[in-house]
Image (cartoon, helix red, strand yellow):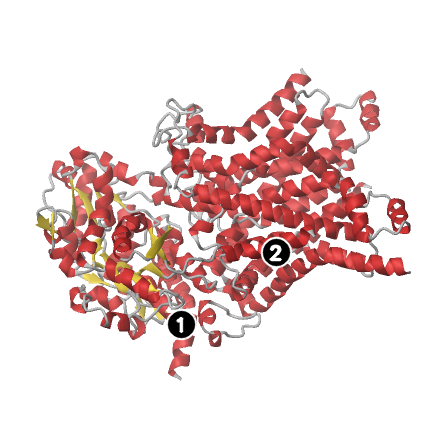
Amino acid sequence: MKRVLVNGLLWVFAGLAVFPLVWMVCVSLMPAGSASSLPPPLIPAHPTLEHYRLLLGDGGLKRAFVNSLGLAVVSTLMSVSFNTLAGYSFAKLRFRHREQVFGLLIAALVIPGQVAMLPLFLMLKGMGLVNTWMGVLIPSMAGIFGIFLVRQYARGVPDELLEAARLDGAGEWRIFWNIVLPTLKPVLVTLAVFAFLGSWNDFMWPLIVLTDGDMHTLPVALAALSREHVNDSELMMAGAVITVLPVLVLFVALQRYYMQGLLMGSVK
Amino acid sequence: MQRRRLLTAAAVAPLAGCARDSSTTTLRFWAMGRESEVAAELIAGFEREHPNVRVKVEQLPWTAAHEKLLTAFAGDATPDLAQVGNTWLPEMQALGALEPLQPWIDRTPMLQAADYFAGIWATNAPGGQRVGLPWYVDTRLMFVRQDLLAKAGINEMPRDWAAWRETLARLRQHGMDKPLLLPTNESAPLLALALQQPEEVLRDGGRYGNFSGAGFRTALAFYLERFQRGEAPGVSEVQIGNLWQEFGRGSFAFYLSGPWDIGEFKRRLPAELANAWITAELPGPTGPGSSIAGGASLAMFKRSRHKPEAWALISYLSRPDVQLEFYRLTGDLPARRSAWAMPLNGATLAEDRHAAAFHRQLERVRAAPAVPEWERIEKEMQLAATRAVHGVTDLDATVKALDARVDGILEKRRWMLDKARA
Amino acid sequence: MRTLHRESLAAWAFAAPALIVIALFFGVPVFAGLALSLTDFDIYALADIGNLRWQGWNNYVHVLSLPLFWQALGNTAYFVVLGVPLSIALSLAAAVLLQSKLVRFKPLLRTALFAPVVTTLVAVAVIWRYLFHVKYGLVNYTLQHFGVDPIDWLGDPHWSMPTIIGFAAWKNFGGNMIIFIAALQAVPHDLYEAARLDGARSWAQFRHITVPNIAPTLLMVAILTTAGYFQLFAEPYVMTQGGPLQSTVSVLYLMYEEGFKWWNLGLASAVAFVLFLIIVVVSKGLIAVQRRLTGEGA
């Protein structure tokens, strides 16, 4: 009895969680105008790919898709490199004021990012970086949480291992590259998925920094589309699928590592 | 090593966007709404005449266009030329973002000031400096399902407020639940009513709000009365769904809109309703009333590096035949009088069944105040009106609060005007 | 000693890229923002810096006297006060259920429950808008079968914020769920065994064993979620544009409008800093409350 209750509740929960996404796919396959009728259809009676063809043709989302992909990849590479190096440094390398600097970073976590947004925009304007890729990437490189995650993980590396390598005459970089990095693999995957998701889903900053429609990322392009085509629900759903499917696929494929990294990271 | 390679790659990426080909110039042209959708067609002719110029049209939704223009100015990322709403010209000119056009106009004999509607031509030179060339004119008037009016025994369009009241009441009696569509997010209908009043909405040369004055009070009272009598639904555009469909279904008989809806209704309404609707001039308090002197202009940005080519495009789009073609594609009315006299489908535009009312209304238009803050003030006006529609505040409180808000918005303007005077 | 010096050098070199980026593109702008908030930097000043005026604390006074600010604060507080407990309750419930030994297909269920977190906010906000459409939305259609009149979820000022709260709960509960799963796994099983032998039922076990043991995690999640919820922006921007009747204008949305729509950067920066202060105060308050509770409990 209890088994039925527990499992049943979970399936209901899961169903509610996933239903909007499934509905999104269904509606995206319906011909234009058919979703705005009563009763609201659930299964497409005459499935069609016309919306996808329109959006991925010259309909603007193809460009945005490529933009989002490129930005996410570069952002992930940069952010993972920077954060891993810094995280390891704070965990294992000894230098003066290490703990104070780290404490400062943790304190900075409380500051909402939006406080910095307006002046950062002006700064980028001064540097001529408004409406450029660099302008979009810059805030994503400053990831305090990533440094924190790596530091937590890297602390698990035994000090004796590093000392032995140093006594053998190995340089710091070689120690990091050959000994430490392989052990950090799980948290690296977590960081990478985190960074990719963050960049792909980022909305407010690209909205502000990118003025050219050609440079828009998927969320920004979708938002613009949704304001212009308020009534074309099927088209909008197709756009939503295009935006959500890649990250969903990525997540499902890597979710074992992602979950592992998060679970380990949150044990304090 | 890996790090350095990544950094250089990232640094080079923005440079890769620069055009390497020096023989073709690419113009960046920002346009909005329906106009941006047809721009590509219109511009094909221009690109044929100027084979070494390519035009990249950027489509902006109207709801985001104003802020995108300001963001572009703030970020030094303005395009070469853009479609700019008339009411935004004072703001753009005060910022020094636009290229003064008089020298260019003087060098182009094809462009004659006399060929433009006088009221519209004047709005394009805020502060005495001409920064825009009118592209199309627009105003607001009524789109009417005259067949439904006839069914209720009304055979004449209402010409003043009293007749309008009566018509709406009669339609309700005959079973139409909400005969007038006034989406609460649209500021144009209320503004048009306000501009029909003798008083200005801002006083002292645009230094203070005058919304608690008699003029706006009268306009707002008439506006609110339509909701209070149940003649208009108190909903915004989003909640209506597909308003063209609803017009076709006969959910309402009157809709206040602009010339672009001529094209939209023609396209979206079924063939049997083609003669069921007509456009009619706005009724005023005591007789045919004025409406908004609206429209958009083409403007060039000071920071553009392709000014001659941009001007060539602006001149091209201002040719009477191209203006007429533009009307055919969008329903937007030409800014040049000569285009109205050119033949189209056997008659001239001035005689066209749907455009004729616009032609007459354009002789009775008034412009919104030419202050840079107008866009914001208009939004505040509509927000205040919506609160009154929903009964959150009564008329008196609404206009007083609105004036207080507007006075605050204009504070910087007052300071700058006083500084300039000193 | 040389190795220590070399290690220290390497440490700075490794940390440098991240630290420089953070200092330059986060630290500097934050201080610049503070400076901006003391002036009336606006679009006129952007055109000509001579139009800049020193304001001192005037911007902050002006913000605190703006009716729209208080409305935004009220909306945001409404969102936080209802949304955080709802989100945490859902996450905890899901985590507890998932931890049960009676569950089959655990990874599948976990993935399904976490999926909304991964999705792009803009995309799912669009989906939500159509699901909750007043005429053609599935939600109203289903409710009609239960005899409930159609509700204008996003167009009625009374329902717009609750709809957004529900949306945020749906989107975010998976994230906290994972954290709770980790915390629950750390609770020793023998405690539950002992309680079961004593005859305690599930609810009693939950109250007396689970909750005290995950209390620190609960506090951390509460603080993080609260701070995050105070930064409500994207949902109103995409779903309602702050409407209807500004019932979904949040503090950050107000900052965005003042800053990026009307370019009153001075005022917008002041709004941002006021929000920051509020978050800090509330977080400290939560910690104090927790301390008082555990103090009394112990």
Residue A201 drawn at (x, y percent): 55, 44
Residue C175 drawn at (x, y percent): 64, 38
Which element type, helix, strand or loop, lies under badge 2? helix
- What kind of residue is marked 1? Arg
Give the image quarter of residue B396.
bottom left
Q: Is residue B310 above or below residue A46?
A: below
Left or right of B191, for residue A16: right
Which element type, helix, strand or loop, lies under badge 1? helix
Query: Is tag 2's residue or tag 1's residue first in the polypeptide sequence?
Result: 2
Left or right of B152, for residue B261: right
Q: Is residue B108 above or below residue B318?
A: below
- What kind of residue is marked 2? Thr
Q: Residues within 10 Å of mark 1 (few under 14, many from 20)?
A: some
Could you tell me which quadrant the C terminus of chain A lies in?
Answer: top right
Residue C52 drawn at (x, y percent): 49, 74
Q: Chain of mark 1?
A: B
User: Is residue B314 at least partly visible in the picture?
Assistant: yes
Of B84 and B37, the residue lying toward us:
B37
Q: Is residue A42 above or below residue B76?
A: above
Give the image quarter of residue C222.
top right
Residue B304 drawn at (x, y percent): 39, 65
Q: Of the numbered discs in the image, which one, if any, rests on residue C143?
A: none
Q: CA distance from mark 2 to mark 1?
A: 46 Å
Q: Of the numbered discs in the image, which one, if any, rests on residue B413?
A: 1
Residue for point 42% across, 80% down? B419
Left or right of A76, for residue A237: left
Pointer 2 residue: B8
Of A58 and B235, the residue lying toward us:
A58
